[in-house]
């Protein structure tokens, strides 16, 4: 199962390494030309030598049993307080345990599958749209744009942005740093003043997102 | 001449739609268990029977009033009509004549009217002799004055209830199934009673100093004893008589136990069948059902959501544990293999179902169910779950409308989460209905007020909703920018204010539940208004 996950992740242009204690699985991964390493993840020293606590940013726990995932999550969380831990969960009751062990995000493939099937049944077109936007199969993407320092957007009102007219982007919402991590959907209900550090969540084509980012100075 | 006239009438009856429809109506009313009017008729008849019998009981001690006689006449008229109508729809006489005629034509022999008449009479006599017809007749006859003596048979009207109540029919069905055992028992019983009554008559007759006066007394005593009732009005006094009594009591116990066990066993055997029948009848009543094949983790989750949103669904699974679980939740279930045509048909794939979900954890099974469903119903929506990427294509080939790749999605989501955690959470929230923000698709129908308006004029912002895009297959829009292919339609992202909406376009909106619902209501009411105005 992890193989399918990894092949998806690998497309995202991030450095990735696969770890497993089972030599057969590592062999399979190497055959598919995926970077893989035989390692016993139960030993803390091994995790440290790999770079957890220093260079590693995110760890995916996609082991087969929930108990192993909980164990790995715990070990990683102890070694590094800030590392992002994403774990897969097979039994619904393990979800809380994983969160308690320190996972940032848990993914239940069964739940996702059932939700997805239900959405397809009730709202097929919306599901398609979100699939394209979230998983980016068509040239329609969702992006988070952080407003940089000294940007001309600082202190502007959301209603003055006119993203859809000027940049061909759809503004889904804003995260106002002053008000916490919550996303405010932009429905024209209340006015927001944008500050440096706020995040705009937009939907649009790759080119338009790039152009907009250039204009506000996120990328050169 | 008479022969020709008969043939003419028979053929014209066969072709007459009016005659056929009238006959069909009475068939639906009296016999067809699937018809909608039969239950009402049955209830009416049950009430009629009960009230007429109650009246009879009342009249035993009270004076007969004028109204009672009128009512009795009415009841009897209804009964007679029913009796005759049942005789009429029992078989088609004209078909018999035609068949006989065709047969003689084929064989080249001559058509004899009397042969057909005999055939018809035989046919109708078989109706007259059927148990339910006899009961019907017995319920009518006692009302005929010269036959007043048969008043007791009015109670037979109660037997008429058999016809109208399914549970009683079920009971008789069970008994019919055990005919052999019951006959054996009855034969054994009659032997036993015969031997016991002659024996007691021999030992206990008045000459011997006993209380048994005649053979009838002996018979009565044997019945009372064998059934273990034992009133004690006739008691044996001789040694021989007492011996016979003891033997009869012991065998009586055995016979009773045997009788009970036959009935219980018969019900046990039939129970699952009855339950299946009930499920089948239940499914037939459902509309817009979803057929859920597989009740594992994924199936259970989907069922939960469907149930919460009050969708109709039927679960098919061949795992006993899963089925028990589903039954505990009160879902409609079929314990069977979903890849069999007959099972899918029973679940209503051609009759009320709108979608099939294949959610077993086995890709091969899912492909097979998909293929079977598509073969049975070319238009139905099929959503299939694929556990391995390489199987997704096979499912599409087999005819699935949509594929859900569970591990694939999980991987994509994990990757997406790394990139855009905020957006991810937000979209997840919307999708799973955790927030009151909704993403909804609204259809523009021909007569609604939005048709022909540009997006600027429609001004969705006033309802605090925002338009993400429009889905349409209308070629008018084809030149617009931001076009994305979506099956056989296109999705127009972020359309210009000048974009004009046409019939059949679908708006994709983001907004609060309240706003979207308001807009939805506006569309519906404007359509209704237009349709009301039209005839004027």
Image (cartoon, rainbow, N blue to C red):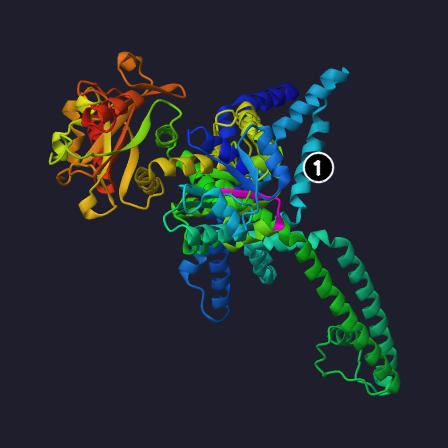
B326 displayed left or right of B483 = right
Residue B424 falls in image quadrant:
top left
B271 displayed left or right of B243 = left
In the image shown, does B157 or A138 lie closer to the viewer? A138
In the rendered view, tell whether residue B1 sits above or below residue A77: above
Magenta range? B312-320
In the rendered view, tell whether residue A170 sits above or below residue A174: above
Quarter of the picture holding the N terminus of chain B:
top right
B317 displayed left or right of B514 = right
Estimate how packed mark 1 is, as few (under 14), some (14 to 19) or many (20 or more) residues with alpha carbons within 10 Å.
few
Label 1: which residue? Answer: B122
Dot 1 falls on which chain? B
- Residue B512 belongs to magenta span: no
Quarter of the picture holding the C terminus of chain B:
top left
Evaluate whether residue B207 shows in this view: yes
Q: Residue B122's x, y, as percent?
A: 70, 37
In the image shown, does B423 or B309 lie closer to the viewer? B423
């Amino acid at each position: 199962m992890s193989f399918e996950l990894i092949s998806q992740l690998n497309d995202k242009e991030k450095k990735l390494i696969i770890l497993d204690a089972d030599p057969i699985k590592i062999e399979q991964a190497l055959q598919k030309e995926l970077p893989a390493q035989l390692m016993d993840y139960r030993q803390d020293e091994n995790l440290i030598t790999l770079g957890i606590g220093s260079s590693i940013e995110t760890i995916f726990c996609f082991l087969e049993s929930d108990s192993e995932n909980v164990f790995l999550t715990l070990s990683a969380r102890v070694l590094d307080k800030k590392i992002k831990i994403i774990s897969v969960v097979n039994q619904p009751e393990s979800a809380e345990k994983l969160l308690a062990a320190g996972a940032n995000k848990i993914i239940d493939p069964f739940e996702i599958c059932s939700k997805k099937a239900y959405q397809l049944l009730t709202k097929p077109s919306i599901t398609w749209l979100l699939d394209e936007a979230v998983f980016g199969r068509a040239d329609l993407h969702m992006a988070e744009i952080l407003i940089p320092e000294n940007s001309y957007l600082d202190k502007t009102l959301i209603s003055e942005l006119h993203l859809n007219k000027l940049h061909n982007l759809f503004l889904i919402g804003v995260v106002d740093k002053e008000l916490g991590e919550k996303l405010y959907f932009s429905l024209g209900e209340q006015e927001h003043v944008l500050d440096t550090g706020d995040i705009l969540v937009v939907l649009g084509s790759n080119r338009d997102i790039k152009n907009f980012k250039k204009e506000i100075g996120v990328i050169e | 001449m008479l022969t020709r006239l008969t043939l003419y009438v028979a053929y014209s009856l066969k072709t007459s739609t009016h005659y056929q429809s009238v006959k069909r109506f009475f068939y639906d009313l009296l016999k067809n268990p699937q018809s909608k009017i039969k239950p009402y008729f049955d209830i009416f008849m049950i009430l009629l029977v009960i009230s007429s019998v109650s009246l009879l009981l009342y009249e035993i001690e009270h004076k007969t009033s004028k109204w009672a006689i009128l009512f009795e006449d009415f009841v009897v008229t209804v009964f007679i009509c029913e009796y005759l109508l049942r005789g009429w729809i029992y078989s088609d006489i004209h078909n018999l004549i035609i068949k006989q005629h065709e047969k003689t034509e084929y064989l080249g022999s001559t058509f004899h009217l009397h042969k057909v008449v005999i055939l018809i009479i035989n046919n109708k006599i078989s109706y007259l002799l059927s148990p339910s017809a006899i009961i019907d007749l017995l319920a009518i006859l006692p009302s005929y004055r010269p036959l007043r003596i048969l008043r007791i048979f009015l109670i037979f009207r109660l037997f008429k209830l058999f016809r109208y109540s399914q549970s009683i029919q079920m009971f008789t069905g069970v008994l019919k199934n055990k005919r052999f055992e019951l006959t054996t028992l009855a034969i054994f019983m009659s032997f036993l009673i015969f031997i016991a009554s002659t024996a007691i008559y021999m030992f206990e007759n008045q000459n011997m100093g006993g209380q048994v006066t005649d053979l009838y007394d002996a018979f009565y005593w044997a019945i009372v004893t064998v059934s273990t009732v034992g009133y004690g009005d006739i008691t044996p006094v001789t040694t021989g008589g007492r011996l016979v009594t003891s033997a009869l009591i012991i065998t009586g116990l055995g016979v009773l136990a045997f009788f009970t066990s036959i009935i219980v066993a018969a019900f046990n055997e039939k129970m699952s069948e009855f339950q299946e029948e009930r499920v089948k009848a239940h499914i037939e009543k459902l509309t817009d059902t979803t057929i859920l094949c597989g009740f594992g983790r994924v199936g259970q989750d989907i069922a939960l959501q469907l149930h919460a949103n009050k969708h109709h669904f039927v679960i098919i699974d061949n795992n006993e544990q899963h089925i028990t679980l589903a039954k505990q939740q009160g879902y409609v279930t079929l314990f069977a293999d979903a890849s069999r045509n007959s099972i899918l048909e029973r679940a209503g794939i051609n009759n009320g179902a709108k979608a099939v979900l294949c959610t077993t954890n086995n890709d091969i099974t899912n492909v097979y169910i998909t293929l079977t469903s598509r073969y049975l119903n070319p238009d139905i929506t099929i959503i299939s779950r694929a556990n391995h990427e390489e199987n997704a294509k096979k499912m599409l080939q087999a005819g699935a409308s949509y594929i859900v790749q569970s591990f694939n999605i999980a991987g994509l989501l994990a990757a997406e989460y790394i990139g855009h955690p905020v957006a991810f959470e937000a979209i997840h929230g919307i999708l799973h209905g955790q927030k009151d923000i909704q993403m909804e698709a609204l259809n523009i129908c021909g007569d609604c007020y939005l048709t022909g308006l540009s997006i600027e004029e429609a001004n969705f912002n006033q309802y605090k909703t925002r338009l993400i895009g429009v889905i349409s297959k209308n070629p008018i829009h084809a030149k617009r920018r931001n076009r994305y292919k979506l099956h056989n339609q296109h999705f127009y992202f972020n359309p210009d204010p000048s974009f004009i909406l046409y019939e059949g376009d679908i708006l994709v909106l983001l907004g609060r539940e309240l706003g979207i619902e308001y807009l939805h209501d506006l569309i519906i009411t404007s359509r209704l208004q237009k349709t009301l105005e039209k005839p004027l």
